[in-house]
């Protein structure tokens, strides 16, 4: 019997003595692919409901509101940016001695398996240095940065000063 015949028999019987079979077993697994899928899953854990912003008079900062849903592990909103504004801060409203005050905060927690509402009278985004590009009825694409999930894009529906989230914006989420 020739060596070639022996190898052919080994392959048919599933005997792992032949080197070509071993090569097949060890080649397909690339760790980089599974890491990419994990990152994607973390990003998808964050979704938004009713993103809107209240425009201000010319040159004054606008305020942004959105409900942040987090189906993953507890995360933190740590920054925001938009081409339509020079700078965006994370703010919190609170009652101090009977007066409404606001202050900048370092981060806003997005509880795992839960949500946090950025809404008038509470947490909000403060959008400084408007370029004037956004008018009532426009969508203002913005990027919210989360500690774990990274950058997630959201489109704020611009409402006029005095306007609000009158109706659900078609359940618009990203
Ligand atoms: Cu503010």
Image (tube, grey):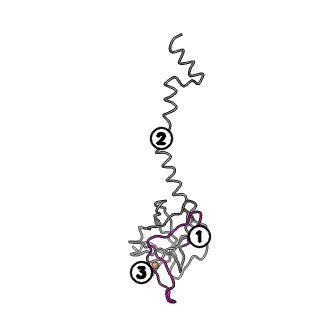
**1 or 3: tag closer to the N-terminus:** 3
Place residue 129 in its image quadrant: bottom left
Name the one closer to the observer, 94 or 50.
Answer: 94
Q: Is residue 115 magenta?
A: yes
Q: Which of the two marks, 2 or 3, is nearer to us in this view? A: 2
Residue at left 54%, top 25%? 16
* Residue 51 x/y as whole percent: 54, 70
**2 or 3: tag closer to the N-terminus:** 2
Q: Are marks 1 and 2 in contact (CB under 8 Å)?
A: no
Left of 24 or right of it: where is 171? right
- The magenta-colored residue range is 90-117
Residue at left 52%, top 26%? 21
Q: Which residue is mark 1?
A: 169
Residue at left 61%, top 71%? 168
Report how far apart the C-alphas of labels 1 and 2 lie in the structure.
Answer: 42 Å
Residue 141, placed above or below residue 103: above
Q: Is mark 3 within 8 Å of ligand 1?
A: no
- The dot on residue 60 is 3
Report how far apart the C-alphas of labels 2 and 3 lie in the structure.
Answer: 51 Å
Q: Residues within 10 Å of mark 2 (few under 14, many from 20)?
A: few
* Residue 99 x/y as whole percent: 50, 88
Quarter of the C terminus within the rendering: bottom right
Residue 46, placed above or below residue 52: above
The overriding secondary structure of the stretch rendered in magenta is strand
Residue at left 60%, top 22%? 13
Left of 170 or right of it: where is 98? left
Q: Which residue is mark 2?
A: 30
* Residue 161 x/y as whole percent: 50, 81
**1 or 2: tag closer to the N-terminus:** 2
Report how far apart the C-alphas of labels 1 and 3 lie in the structure.
Answer: 25 Å
């Amino acid at each position: 019997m020739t060596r070639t015949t022996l190898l052919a028999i080994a392959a048919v019987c599933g005997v792992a003595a032949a080197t070509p079979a071993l090569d097949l077993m060890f080649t397909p697994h690339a760790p980089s692919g599974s890491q990419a899928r994990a990152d994607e899953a973390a990003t998808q854990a964050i979704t938004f409901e009713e993103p809107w912003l209240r425009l201000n008079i010319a040159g004054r900062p606008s305020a942004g509101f959105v409900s942040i849903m987090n189906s993953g592990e507890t995360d933190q909103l740590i920054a925001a940016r938009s081409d339509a504004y020079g700078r965006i801060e994370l703010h919190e409203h609170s009652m101090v001695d009977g007066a409404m005050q606001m202050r900048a905060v370092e981060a806003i927690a997005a509880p795992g398996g839960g949500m946090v509402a950025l809404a008038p009278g509470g947490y909000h985004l403060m959008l400084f240095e408007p370029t004037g590009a956004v008018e009532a009825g426009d969508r203002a694409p913005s990027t919210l940065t989360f500690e774990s999930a990274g950058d997630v894009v959201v489109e704020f529906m611009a409402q006029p000063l005095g306007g609000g989230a009158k109706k659900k914006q078609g359940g618009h989420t990203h």
